[in-house]
Amino acid sequence: MNSAYFGSPHLSATLLTQLIEKDDLSISLVVTQPNKPAGKRLEMMPTAVKLLAQKHTIEVFDEESFEKLPRLLEKIDEGYEVVSGWRQGRWAGALFTRRLPSIVANMIISAVTGVSLHDYGCTLKAYRSDVIKGVKLYGEMHRFIPAYAAWQGGRVAEIPVTHSPRKHGKSNYGFGRVFRVLLDLVVVVFMHRYMNRPMHFFGMWGLASLSFGFLVGCIAITLRIFVGLHLIDTPLPVLTALLIIVGIQLVLFGVIGEMIMRTYYESQNRRPYTIKESTIEH
């Protein structure tokens, strides 16, 4: 489970250490006080919590970081449900190793989801609670929250924000991240389009496989009758059997998916739709 930690006193550093060591908890963000002058030279010193977070390469937010929030909230007040940051000046001097993979990944996500953003990976976002209250996040699905909100009918905006360079640790961003994003994107799009009708997905491919199977079988029989080519002389009978078996399995997957979908909604008394506001008139 991904969590954010808020704390500044020295005692908080001990608690943060214990939380970091937990296997079932992942601290992805630490919020603490900004650097303060200390010592005879009044040097700017970070808090113990900030030092510990930087040691474990955890992203740190302080009061200076939250100076950007009013701009996001102004957009929320304009009627947007989600406002996402667009980090400026990121990947300077790393065109091929950092910037290009980022551009490619964001273009692919924008094209597939239909929500055009320049920086899906920016964690500086503002949301209306009613839009994302029911969103369940697993793995690295947090980057797709704007798409979730847009699919629920929410309006999404993007504003430029100042990028704070990483001071500790090493970024793992590269072309390998693009492929991981693609796999997550397949899951997200499937859940959006076919979560409530899995038979339409599996059944479509199942019927296509069955149709090709019968077509290949007819070709094999035609060759045997009119050309005299024995069935054992071609791979067509094996291909026919394979396509028919795969088609039947896909259709059955669709049936199982429908049963699971109904169990999911009915067992939790959930609805496959969201009501933003209701007005009852007497």
Image: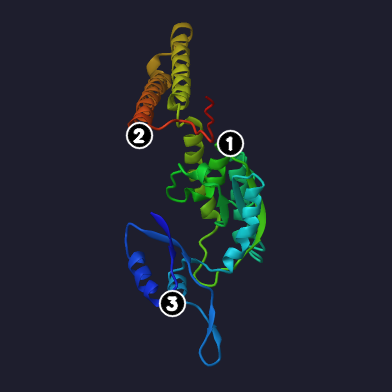
Residue 117 can be seen in this image: no
Say few, some or many: other residues with alpha carbon within 10 Å of mark 1 (under 14 / 14 to 19 / 20 or more): few
Q: Residues within 10 Å of mark 2 (few under 14, many from 20)?
A: few
Identify the residue at image location x=42%, y=48%: 138
Front residue of this view, candidates 70 and 273: 70
Q: Badge 3: few (under 14), some or many (20 or more) residues near its Cα, within 10 Å?
A: some
Q: Work out how far the residue at label 3 is from the one at label 2, CA to CA, in angstroms.
A: 43 Å
Q: Residue at x 37, y 18 (%)?
A: 232
Q: Which one is earlier in the sequence, the residue at label 2 or at label 1?
A: 1
Q: Percent from the top left, x then y, of residue 172?
A: 50, 61
Give percent across and percent down for residue 20.
36, 65
Q: Residue furthest front?
A: 282
Q: Is residue 254 left or right of residue 100?
A: left
Please state which of residues 35 and 251 is positioned toward the viewer in this rendering.
Answer: 35
| Pointer 1 or 3: first along the chain | 3
- Whole-angstrom CA distance, mark 2 to mark 1, is 23 Å
Q: Amino acid at mark 2?
A: Gln
To which residue does mark 2 refer? 268
Q: Is residue 184 left or right of residue 251?
A: right
Image height check: is 26 above or below 257? below
The residue labelled by disc 1 is 153
State the residue position of label 3: 48
Q: Residue furthest top?
A: 225
Q: Nearer the viewer, residue 57 or 93?
A: 57
The residue under label 3 is which amino acid type?
Ala
Mark 3 or mark 2: name the one nearer the start of the chain. 3
Q: Which secondary structure, mark 1?
A: loop
- State the image coordinates of residue 137 (x, y, percent, origin top left): 44, 47
